[in-house]
Structure formats: structure tokens, C-alpha cells
Amino acid sequence: MRKVLLVLLAALVLSLLRSVYSARRFGDEDKAAEEFESKIVLGFAQLGAESEWRSSSSASIKEAARKYGVELMFENAQQKQENQIKAIRSFIAHRVDVIAFSPVVELGWDNVLLEAKAEGIPVILVDRHIRTDAERLYAAFIGSDFIEEGRKAGRWLLEKFRNSEGEVKIVELRGTDGSSPTKDRAEGFREMIGNDGRFLIVRSLSGDFMRSKGREVMEEVLSPAYYNPSAGMTLDVLFAHNDDMAMGAIEAMEEHGLRPGRDVVVISVDAQRSALEALRNGKINCIVECTPYIGERLMDLVRQLVAGYEIPSTIYSEETVFTEDDPVESLPVRPY
């Protein structure tokens, strides 16, 4: 009888151990499944790496994804719209939770974004806008107010030349043609100076937001065919749509014996480290800030969308203006 009781007790203990093991095992599986189901997947199509600003923007997004536990599918389109469209279609095929991208240009997105909409995948525009007649192709835009950036540049220029009576000849270095920052910065700038007949934009050329092209275009501007002070063909102001083009143009000016910041007033946009150093050294007179640090705000929007919350359709970054009148010690030191 005792032997039978011992066998029954052993069987009971074994059964209990199996139950505990089973509960733990299935509990772990449930937990893992729960974590998998709650993992947010974001597909991001970056337009390229044409500038230090863009590289910093990409770094901000990658770091924020790691911090917030968002799985990031990141594609570099190398400044080609067709590559971005291909990347977005890949994100749709992978059934990501949210798609975000910085569009190379404004037009030509309707078809692929309609495909995302049909699959119920929300889209966020980052840094740049698109133009479309279709309704609600994207959930939100996050980035800078480019028109206001142009206005800020124009306001500063009006103040700079408030006591000047002669003509002010301006060369504009545009960014990528067809992109929203190029169009909007030009619009805001002209809005501010357009009613003052002293200000003349004598040349407006695209440097594609690149330092090398900014230098190349400025070389053309300073060629004898366009720049000849003895013949009245002069240059008073350079307005560059970003720092990289401004820095390239400064190199060209110095090679031609001009003193940027003194012989030619230089206005730029972004506030990268190299440009702020040029401002400290008197080679740039005014920089309108455009911050690349939007990664954390983007991840917050992504999480809100996945959770089903309504989000604002437009979110602008808070930005300032740095000028030659600011104390040198007050200028920020940037990592980019």
C-alpha cells in the first residue's frame, strides 16, 4: 500500500511540474507574441545624402527609432524620385505600419501614395512637401516652414540696407528645382523684398543644395561675362538656399579676390557648423536656421498614428536667425 502511495505521489508531483513548465512556456510564448504584435515598423525613404544637413537628419531619425523601439526600414534614394517610389512600394509590400519620406520633388507622388492608402498604411511627409489634387494622401507634414525661412532672409536684408539708396544686386543660389524648400524659400524672400525697387535679383541659378555645385555656379556668376565692376556689372548680395551652396560660393568668391561678408553680403539657410564658423569669421552675414533634428517628433507621431489617435496635419519646427550682430560667444556649436 505504501509503495502504491509513493507511486501516486510521484505521479502527482510530475504532473504539477509539467503544468508549471507548460504555463511558463506558453506564458513566454504569449509574451513574445504580444511584443511582436506591438512592435511598430516604420518605412522611411530618405531622398539622399546631398549635404551635412541631410546626413544629420538621417542620423536623427535612426537614433530616435532605436530610442523608441521602432523597427526602421531605411532607404537612401540618392536624389532620385524613382528610387523613392520603388522604396515606398517595397514598404507597402512588407506591410509596414507607417511610411515616411522626404520627397525629392513636389510632383509625381499620387499613384504610389494611392497604393499606400488602399492598403491602409498612413504616410508622413518629412522636411519637404508634395503637390497633389488627391485628398488625404498623407496624414501629416513635419518639418520647417520654408516660406517663413525666405521671409526671415528678406526681412534681415531689408534691415541691413535700410539706409542705402542705390540698387542692391542679388544673386540667388536655388536648391533642387521642383522641391518645396526651393520654391517656398524663393517665394518668401521675394514677398519681403518685392515692393522695394532697390532690390534686384540679377541671377537665380540652381546649385542643387550641393557644395560642389554652389561653387561651380558661383564661378559662372563671377566670370567676365556677368561680373565686371568697371562696366557696372557688380554683385552686392548672395542669397543661398542652404549652407552647403553658400560655402561653395564663398570658396569661389575668395578665389576671385572678393571678401565674402564684406564685399558681398552673404545670406544662407540651415545653420550648420561650417556656416556658423563662417559667420564667426565674418564671411557670412546672416543664417536662417533650419533644424534637421526631427527624429523624436517623428517617432512620437508614428506611435500616435498606430495607436489610432488624431494628429495635427502640419507640425513646424521652432527655428531662429543668427546674424553678424550676435555676440560670437552666443552662437551655438553644432555637431553637424
Image: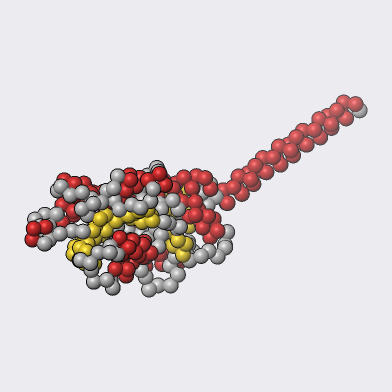
Of residue 319 and residue 48, the one placed in the foreground of this image is 319
Of residue 273 and residue 102, the one placed in the foreground of this image is 273
Q: In what quadrant of the picture does the C terminus appear? A: top left
Q: Is residue 92 at least partly visible in the picture?
A: no
Of residue 289 and residue 259, the one placed in the foreground of this image is 259
Number of numbered callouts drawn: 0
Question: At 15% across and 47% down in the image, what residue appears?
Answer: 257
- How is the protein colored in the picture? secondary structure
Seen as rendered, the residue at the extreme front is 163
The picture places residue 50, in percent across and down from the top left corner, at 30, 50
Question: At 44% across and 51% down in the image, what residue appears?
Answer: 293
Seen as rendered, the residue at the extreme right is 1
Q: In what quadrant of the picture does the N terminus appear? A: top right
| Residue 196 sits in quarter | bottom left
The picture places residue 86, in percent across and down from the top left corner, at 35, 56
Question: At 74% across and 38% down in the image, what residue appears?
Answer: 20
The picture places residue 308, in percent across and down from the top left corner, at 57, 62
Q: Is residue 120 at least partly visible in the picture?
A: yes
The picture places residue 321, in percent across and down from the top left corner, at 38, 56
Of residue 144 and residue 54, the one placed in the foreground of this image is 144
Left or right of 22 on screen, residue 233 = left
Question: At 15% across and 56% down in the image, what residue appears?
Answer: 221
The correct choice, above or below, for 204 with respect to 40 in the image is: below
